[in-house]
Amino acid sequence: MSAKSKKSKAGSARDKARLDVEGQPEKSKERNLADVSLDPAASGMAAARMFIAGSFGEQDSTELYLSLSDKGKAAASGDLTHYKTMLAAQADTLNSVFTELARRAALNMGEYISATEIYMRLALKAQVQCKANIEALDRLSNGRVQTVRHVHVNDGGQAVIADEFHHHTGGRKNGKSNEQPHATGTAGKSPAMLSQDAQGDGVPVSSGKGKQAVPDARR
């Protein structure tokens, strides 16, 4: 299934809303329509066209579909250049959102404390998402290794710690580690928990000879 770029003579809104896609002749009309409805580029086009209209005007559905299809094919082949640029641009945008919200929080400080709190909460959310974008961009660009640690506590208080390594290779499939997902043998054993000793004596509790003054907490 493919789409052809069309050149609209009048450029009417109705023409722009129409998606022209060539169906596969061996498939029925209903099947071709179903394939289009499940096409990621078509779904992205339908949503993006509505969200970007306020900033960039009404976009031609077919041209937008073709643009998204090209970017999707590039990503599938391992070329994430567009999406790296997108993450970087979004990080800068989120930083601008943080700056504006922090400015509004400062303007309300001392007089409208509730407004200050709301603005600062939103500003810090933008800051956290900005940081997440930068970290995602770093993983895509440099292939960072992420370690996920699982702690399993067995009966008797013994802890078994297993590490899983996920190798991010910038668009390629995650590398597989030769390590087993769960540690075996003596690896990961934790010290025994305090209990009564073999002779039946209780665990000694330290005590002082007299009462001692407790210093006041810093205020």
Image (spheres, rainbow, N blue to C red):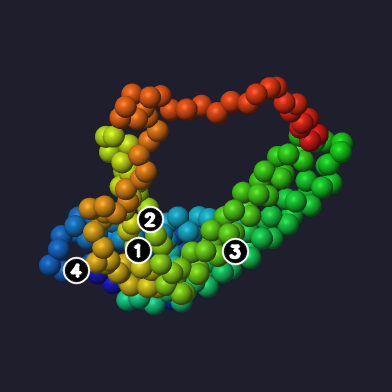
Q: Earlier in the sequence, mark 1 or mark 3?
A: 3
Residue 172 visible from this viewpoint: yes
Q: Give residue 47's position: percent from left, percent from top.
A: 45, 55
Residue hosting label 1: 166
Q: Are marks 2 and 1 in contact (CB under 8 Å)?
A: yes
Give the CA distance from mark 2 to mark 3: 26 Å
**10 Å neighbourhood of mark 1: few (<14), some, or many (≥20)?**
some
Give the CA distance from mark 2 to mark 4: 45 Å
Q: Residue at x 33, y 24 (%)?
A: 200
Residue hosting label 4: 24
Q: Residue at x 12, y 67 (%)?
A: 26
Residue 215, above or below 210: below
In this orientation, which residue lies closer to the viewer: 157 or 49? Answer: 157
In this orientation, which residue lies closer to the viewer: 177 or 134? Answer: 177
**10 Å neighbourhood of mark 4: few (<14), some, or many (≥20)?**
few
Going by the numbered disc 2, the residue's amino acid type is: Val
**10 Å neighbourhood of mark 3: few (<14), some, or many (≥20)?**
many
Residue hosting label 3: 91
Q: Give residue 89's position: percent from left, percent from top.
A: 58, 68
Give the CA distance from mark 3 to mark 4: 41 Å
Q: Are marks 2 and 4 in contact (CB under 8 Å)?
A: no
Q: Give residue 199's position: percent from left, percent from top.
A: 32, 27
